[in-house]
Amino acid sequence: MQFKISETMLRRTVLPVVLVLLLGVTLWAFKQNDKKDDSSKEQMLLTAIGTILEQKHYDPKTIDDNFSKQVFEKYLEALNPDKSIFLQSDINYLKKYQLTLDDEIHGAPLKFYPEAAGIYLKNVDAIMLLYKDILSQPFDFNIKEEIQLDNDKIDFPADAAARKEMWRKKLKYATLGLYTDYLKQKEDKTKDTTVANKTNAQLEAMAREKLLTNLNRIYTREKLILTNQEQFSRYVNVITDLMDPHTEYFPPVESRSFQEEMSGRFFGIGAQLKDDNGVVKIAAVIPGSPAYKSGKVQINDAIIKVGQGNAEPVDVSGYAITDVVKLIRGNKGTEVRITFRKPDGSTQVVPIIRDEIVQDEQYARSAVIKTANGNFGYIFLPEFYADFDNPDGNRCSKDVANEIIKLKKENVQGIILDLRNNGGGSLPEVVNMVGLFIPQGPVVQVRDRNGKPIILPDNDTSVLYNGLLAVMVNEFSASASEIFAAAIQDYKRGIIIGSDTYGKGTVQRTMPLGKPIDFTTGQPEYGTLKLTFEKFYRINGGSTQLKGVTPDVILPDPLEYLKLREKDQPSALAWDKVEKADYTVYNSGINWEKVEADAKARIQASPTFATIEKNALWIKDNTDKKYSLNLEDYRNQQKQLSNVVKNDDSLSMLKTAMNIYPVAEDSTIYYHNADTLKGLRYQKWLGDIQKDLYIDETVKVLHDMGKERN
C-alpha cells in the first residue's frame, strides 16, 4: 500500500530576484525558439528546474554521477513498479545512460527518458498479446504454488520466458480473487442468475473474461495518456522526488489541479462523472451550473469527445474519469465542447462556457454531539485550504471561526477539531487558526537553509474560543495539521488524541514556470515547481519532520504499524531541532495528568481497543509474505484477512449511534439541498460520524477535562 500526502505547506510569494533572472533568461530562450521542437523546450525547462533545485532547495543533493544512477533506477521503477514490463536485457541496454542523466539535467540533449518510454510502450504491446494468450486457457487452482507481490523482493525477468511465467502467476492470482468472489456468491445462494446457475468451470471462465476486460482498459488508457508530455513529467518528477518527497513538478494541467485543490474552487461545467464499465458518464448535474443552464446535459449521458472551443476534439474512449475531468476543466469564460452519446443512442455536441464551481464539500463543517453530560461541538476540517487568488475566497481559519460561532450558540461544553486524514495546506492559515484558541504568542518556527529560525506569531490578543478543546489526529494528519496539533500541545491549550502523525516538517513554495496564460487564475505557461525551501519547528524547538506529533492520548489504530509515514520515504529529510521559542503555557486549570491517566486506563480496559491493537499487529506480520495460488490455501488466507478487516470495520462503529445533528442554520444543507446527491452525501457523513468509535472516546475525554478543571 502506498500513500502520498494530498497536499503540503504552501506560501504564495514572488520569486527571489536571482530566480526571476534565471527563469527570465530561460523563458526568453523558449520564446526565441518557438519554432524548435518540443524536446528542445523540454531540455531547457529541465535545465532551469535543475538549476533551481541546486540553488534553492532546502537540502539539495549533488547532481552528479551518483545522482544519475538514482534517477536511472527510479525512472524505470516509476514506469514499471512491479517489474513486469521491462526485461533485464532492456535494463542492460539502457544502462548506457546510467551516468549521463546528470549531464542531461545540466543541458545535454534528452535521450534517456524518450528511449526508455519507447521501449516500455513497445513492451506494452507485447504484454497485451501475452495476457490475452494466457487468459485464453483455464487455470488449475489445485496446484500448490505461491506468488511474491512485494516489488522490492523481485527482479526484472531475465528473458521473455521468465516474463511470461511472471505474468502467468500475476494473472492466476488476479483471476483467483475474482473466481473466489463468484464462488462465494454462488455458495451464498445469490439471486443473480449469472452466477447461481453457473458451473465452477463457467465461473472460472467468467473471472478470466472480466480480468481481460479490465486489463484491456488499463493498458489502452496507459498507451493513450503516456504522451511525450506525460513521459517528460514523470521523468522530471523522479528527479524532484530524489531531492525530497514533497518537491514536485506540475505540468500546466496538473498545476491548475493543484491550485484548485488548495482553493476549493475551479472553472468547469458543474457535472459529476461516474465510470460505467469503462465509459465515463454524467452522474449528476449541479443546479445552477453551466451544464444545468445548457439544458442539454442529462444524467447517464456518455462523454465521447471533449474539445477546447474550435480545436479538434479529443476522443476519450478508454480514458479514466480523472483524465476526462482535466480536459473539461479550464479557464473561466472559455468554451468546452462535449460530444455526448445519449441513452437513446444519438450523439450531440454541447458547447458550454466554463464558470466557477465551488467545492464546498471540502470546506470545514460542524455538528452538535448531544450526550447525557451535555452538548459538545464537532468540527471536521479535511485540509488547510486557502484561495490565494481571490481576496474574498474561502480560507479555513475564517470558516472554522464561523463554525465555532455556530457551536457557541448551541452552548457546547467543549469542541472537537477533527484533523484525521488532513494532509496539510496553507501555513498562514495554521497561524490564524491557532490564534482562534490562544491570546497571542509564537505558533511555529520556520528556517530556510541559510538563516536562523523565524518565528511566526499570532499577534491578535483576542480569543474566539476559550473552552475545552480536543484535536483528533492519525497517521495521515500531516504538515499543517501537525503544526496546529503541536502548537495546541505545546501551549497545553487542549488535548491531542489519536495515533502518531505523518511526520512532515518541511515547507513548500510554488514557483511558476513561464509567463501567465490565464490572468484569472495566474496559470503559468510551462507549469509549476513546488519546491521545499524551508523546514518548520515546534515552538518547543523540536521538528515534526520524521517524528510527527505523539498524541497525549493514544488510541489503537488499524494501520498503526504499516509503513505509511514520512520516515518510510527513502528521500525524506532528516530530523533536527532549534532553540525553544519564548512562550507561556496556557492556564486552562485542567489536571492534565489525571485526564490522560483516566483515558489511558479506560482505553486499556476496553476489549474493543485491545482487539484493534491485536489486529493491527496481525496486519503488520502478514503484509510481506508470499500469497498462495492454491484455491483452498488462498481462501484460508483471504478469510483470515477478511475477518481482521471486517472486525476492524465493525469495531470502529458503535453499536448504538451517538446523537449528532447539524446546527439549525445548516439544516437545509442536509435535508433540503437543491443538489439532492450532495444533500445525501451530507446525511451519510452525519451517519458515519454518529457511529465513530474514536469520536465517542474523544467526547469522553472532553467530559473528563471538564470534571478535572479547577
Image (cartoon, helix red, strand yellow):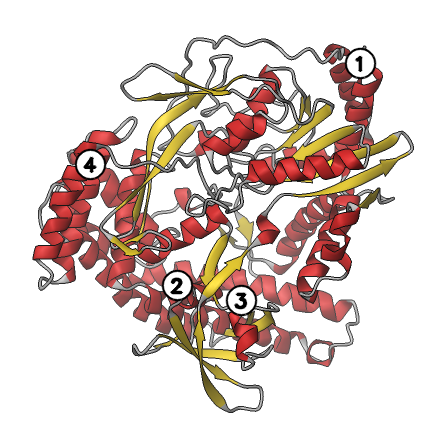
x 53%, y 67%: residue: 270
Estimate the x, y position of residue 547 in percent, counting from the top left: 50, 23
Q: Which residue is mark 2?
A: 330
Residue type at tag 4: Leu
Q: Earlier in the sequence, mark 1 or mark 2?
A: 2
In this picture, is 393 found above or below 214? above
Q: Quadrant of residue 622?
A: top right
Q: Secondary structure at mark 3?
A: loop
Q: Which residue is mark 1?
A: 709
Determine if residue 321 is in view: yes
x 59%, y 18%: residue: 461
Q: Is residue 441 left or right of residue 672?
A: left
Task: Please tell me which residue lies in front, 519 or 359.
Answer: 519
In this picture, is 672 found above or below 599? below
- Between the C-alphas of marks 4 and 3, the distance is 38 Å
Q: Earlier in the sequence, mark 3 or mark 1?
A: 3
Residue type at tag 1: Arg
Q: Which mark is residue 341?
A: none
Q: Which residue is mark 4?
A: 19
Q: Which residue is mark 3?
A: 270
- Between the C-alphas of marks 2 and 3, the distance is 12 Å
Q: Earlier in the sequence, mark 4 or mark 3?
A: 4
Q: Is residue 74 left or right of residue 269?
A: left
Q: Earlier in the sequence, mark 4 or mark 2?
A: 4
- Between the C-alphas of marks 3 and 1, the distance is 49 Å
Q: Is residue 372 left or right of residue 23?
A: right
- Between the C-alphas of marks 4 and 2, the distance is 28 Å
Mark 4 and mark 1 in contact? Answer it, CB < 8 Å.
no
Q: Secondary structure at mark 1?
A: loop
- Between the C-alphas of marks 1 and 2, the distance is 53 Å
Determine if residue 156 is in view: no
